[in-house]
Image (cartoon, helix red, strand yellow):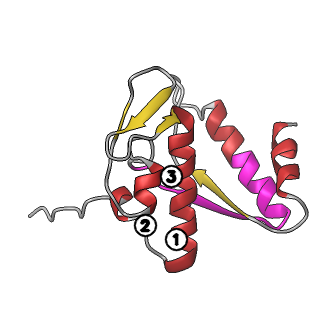
């Protein structure tokens, strides 16, 4: 029911759906409910013609989405359990919205120019000899 309700929000036209690619396991090394939902949701969305993009979640919950959109690195502080504040621009934002907005920003940037916003990039891996 939840998958159908979310997909109804997209409407009949194909749309881009960005999903975090984090993996969560149970203590018994089984897929979590989150992982099962994500797999089922992606399969059903693709069957309806939507484009589903899996996004690497690196730094998505720690960077301000407003600043990242302008390629300004700025971490958020978490003064309360559900709220964050940007140390650069001073914007207050819900903790869950930080990750969701950054995942959407990454997907949008990837679709336009195949890059990731600079503040949300992974550092290059050092070569080990």
Q: Which residue is mark 2?
A: 116
Q: Which is nearer the eye, 70 or 40?
A: 70
Residue stretch rendered in magenta on the structure: 39-58
Query: Which residue is denoted by mark 1 in the rendering?
Result: 110
Q: Is residue 101 placed above or below 112 in the rendered structure?
A: above
**x and y percent of residue 92 in the render?**
47, 35
Which element is circle 1 on? helix
Q: Residues within 10 Å of mark 3 (few under 14, many from 20)?
A: many
Q: Is residue 78 magenta?
A: no
Q: Please name the residue that numbered disc 3 is placed on.
A: 102
Q: Quick one: which residue is furthest to the left in this view?
A: 129
2 or 68, nearer to the observer: 68
- Horizontally, is 49 left or right of 112 in the view? right
Q: Are marks 2 and 1 in contact (CB under 8 Å)?
A: yes
Q: Is residue 84 above or below residue 20?
A: above
Chain-order first, disc 2 or disc 3: 3
Q: Quadrant of residue 84?
A: top left
């Amino acid at each position: 029911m939840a998958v159908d309700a979310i997909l109804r929000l997209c409407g009949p036209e194909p749309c881009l759906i960005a999903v975090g690619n984090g993996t969560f396991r149970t203590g018994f090394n089984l897929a979590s409910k989150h992982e099962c939902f994500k797999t089922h949701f992606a399969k059903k969305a693709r069957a309806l013609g939507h484009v589903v993009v899996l996004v690497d979640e690196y730094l998505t919950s720690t960077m301000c989405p407003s600043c990242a959109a302008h390629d300004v690195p700025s971490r958020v502080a978490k003064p309360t359990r559900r709220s964050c504040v940007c140390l650069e621009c001073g914007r207050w934002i819900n903790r869950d919205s930080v990750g969701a907005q950054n995942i959407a920003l990454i997907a949008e940037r990837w679709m336009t120019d195949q890059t990731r916003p600079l503040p949300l990039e992974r550092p290059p891996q050092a070569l080990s000899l």
